[in-house]
Image (tube, grey):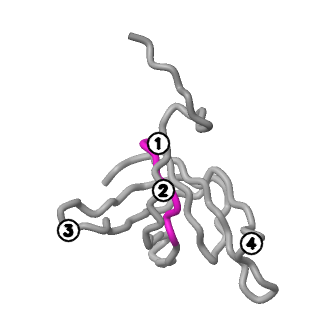
């Protein structure tokens, strides 16, 4: 049986919108952000810190229910864009596209 994709999302893996607080760790420094969406191969994080493309980060966030385990992964920054909707002159907000390299 062939299943046809009849939705606007044309990626290989569907992204789930989760909007969960996330902690990114780089070189022992923790940064707080929001994981906006998650798929089996990547995630989109909103954060007030810019990271260069190619940097590896440890990412963790707790699920909304105690019945689910916490999510911990190593991810690589694929893209970092200024979030023009949330940025001000004083505080810049960034959208990071991350590729999941390893679930830990």
Residue designated by label 3: 66
Question: Is the N terminus in the top left, top right, bottom left or bottom right quadrant?
Answer: top left
Percent position of residue 68, x then y: 22, 60
Specify the segment rendered in magenta.
34-40
Image coords of residue 13 (percent x, y):
48, 36
Q: Mark 2 to mark 4: distance in Å?
A: 18 Å
Q: Earlier in the sequence, mark 1 or mark 2?
A: 2
Q: Dividing the picture into quarters, in which one does residue 97 lie?
A: bottom right
Disc 1 element:
loop
The numbered dot on residue 17 is: 2
CA separation, marks 3 and 2? Answer: 19 Å
**Disc 3 versus disc 1: distance between alpha carbons?**
24 Å
Instruction: Compare residues 48 and 19 and report the one nearer the observer.
Output: 19
Q: Of 73 and 34, which appears nearest the observer?
A: 34
The Cα atoms of the two marked residues, 4 and 3, are separated by: 33 Å
Q: Which badge, 3 or 2, comes first in the chain's sequence?
A: 2
Residue with the mark numbered 1: 41
| Mark in the foreground, 1 or 2 | 2
Upstream in sequence: badge 1 or badge 4? 1
Q: Residue furthest right?
A: 89
Which residue is pictured at 44% across the width and 12% down the height? 2
């Amino acid at each position: 049986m062939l299943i046809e994709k009849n939705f606007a999302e044309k990626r290989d893996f569907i992204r789930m919108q989760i909007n969960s607080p996330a902690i990114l760790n780089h070189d022992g420094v923790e940064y707080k952000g929001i994981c906006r969406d998650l798929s089996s191969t990547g995630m989109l994080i909103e954060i007030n810190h810019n990271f260069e493309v190619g940097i590896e980060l440890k990412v963790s966030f707790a699920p909304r229910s105690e019945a689910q385990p916490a999510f911990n992964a190593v991810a690589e920054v694929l893209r970092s864009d200024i979030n023009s909707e949330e940025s001000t002159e004083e505080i810049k907000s960034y959208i990071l596209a991350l590729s999941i390299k390893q679930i830990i």
